[in-house]
Image (cartoon, rainbow, N blue to C red):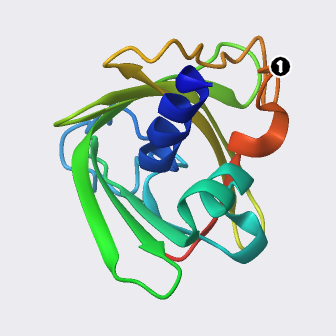
Amino acid sequence: MKKLLYLLIALLSISFIACSDDDNDGGTDPIDDAKPWVGTWLSAGSNVAPILVNVFQYDSVRVTMNVDNTVTLESHVKDGAWSTLSGVYTVNESSSGNVHAININYTAFEQEGIIEVVSGNPDQMKLEAVQTVPDIGATPRTPESGFGSEPALGNLNIQTYVRIN
């Protein structure tokens, strides 16, 4: 039960983030070369991971993933204020498929998991990450294991975002 509580705390912090290296081939605009996860994303209402809603009372999460691999995570608690975390991220692109591994490093903790961006109107991003440092005993999902494959959590830790910028 204690591990689950730590996992929930970690998930609170994770709820979003991802990016990757950007190669700027002399003179081109870095934004033109940006990976699909670069941008500002909002998760609200039924898109917020159930674990974040039920345990932490989140009603919105906004994440900005920049081309320089910095990330800003803003979370909002129902009837409360926004809180902000900053960090850096890396995305290790899968050689097959659209689900990639992600590592997010904030000052106080790190997270690992998977990310997927689906083009549409608007684009959608799915993120499932768990705290790995400090270690809480959580096992990050991988592109091979897929979303919702953690036996204890299932789909409770999947955060869905829509692109807002």
**On the image, numbered disc 1 is attached to which residue?**
151
Quadrant location of the N terminus in the rendered image: top right
Q: Is residue 12 depicted above or below 121 in this figure? A: above
Q: Which quadrant of the structure image shows residue 116? A: top right
Is 45 on the left-hand or right-hand side of 136?
right
What's the residue at 41%, 40% (across, down)?
19
Identity of the amino acid at label 1? Pro
Furthest toward the front, the residue is 1
Identify the element where label 1 is drawn.
loop
Is 32 on the left-hand or right-hand side of 85?
right
Whether residue 108 is visible to the viewer of this picture, yes or no, is yes
What's the residue at 65%, 63% (across, down)?
53
Q: Position of residue 129 (x, y in %)?
A: 55, 33
Whether residue 102 is visible to the viewer of this picture, yes or no, is no
Name the residue nearer the viewer: 96 or 101.
101
Furthest toward the bottom, the residue is 79
Q: Is residue 96 depicted above or below 111 in this figure? A: above
Name the residue nearer the viewer: 138 or 98.
138
Q: Which quadrant of the structure image shows residue 148? A: top right
Q: Is residue 121 depicted above or below 20 in this figure? A: below
Q: Position of residue 89 (x, y in %)?
A: 33, 34
What's the residue at 27%, 51% (across, down)?
28
Is 85 on the left-hand or right-hand side of 57?
left
**Count of picture labels:** 1
Q: Position of residue 162 (x, y in %)?
A: 64, 68
Q: Position of residue 92 (x, y in %)?
A: 48, 19
